[in-house]
Amino acid sequence: MEVTWIGGGDDPWGYVRQGFEGSTVIPVADYGMMDMGPTAQEVEISIFFEGVRPK
């Protein structure tokens, strides 16, 4: 999954934070999920995470 940097900087506690986001689409049939209805052929997965550099 490719991720995109969405911003960052110093926080009030003296750490440096960086935020990232990413998403991907998977076909449900690849994971044996066949009973999700006639229109549900894929699922989008989104992730948002933050990295914190220690002092």
Image (cartoon, rainbow, N blue to C red):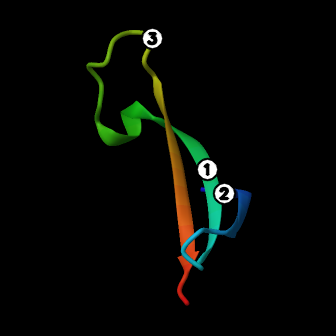
Per the image, label 1 sits on a secondary structure element best described as strand
Q: Are marks 1 and 2 in contact (CB under 8 Å)?
A: yes
Above or below, comparing residue 23 to residue 18 in the picture: above
**Tag of residue 6:** none
Amino acid beneath label 2: Val
Q: Earlier in the sequence, mark 3 or mark 1?
A: 1
**Tag of residue 39:** 3
Identity of the residue drawn at 65% across and 66% down: 18
Between 33 and 44, which is closer to the camera in this rendering? 44
The quadrant in which the C terminus is found is bottom right
Tell me the residue that label 2 is attached to: 3
Tell me the residue that label 1 is attached to: 22
Q: Earlier in the sequence, mark 2 or mark 3?
A: 2
Q: Is residue 2 left or right of residue 28?
A: right
Above or below, comparing residue 9 to residue 25 in the picture: below
Quadrant hosting residue 38? top left
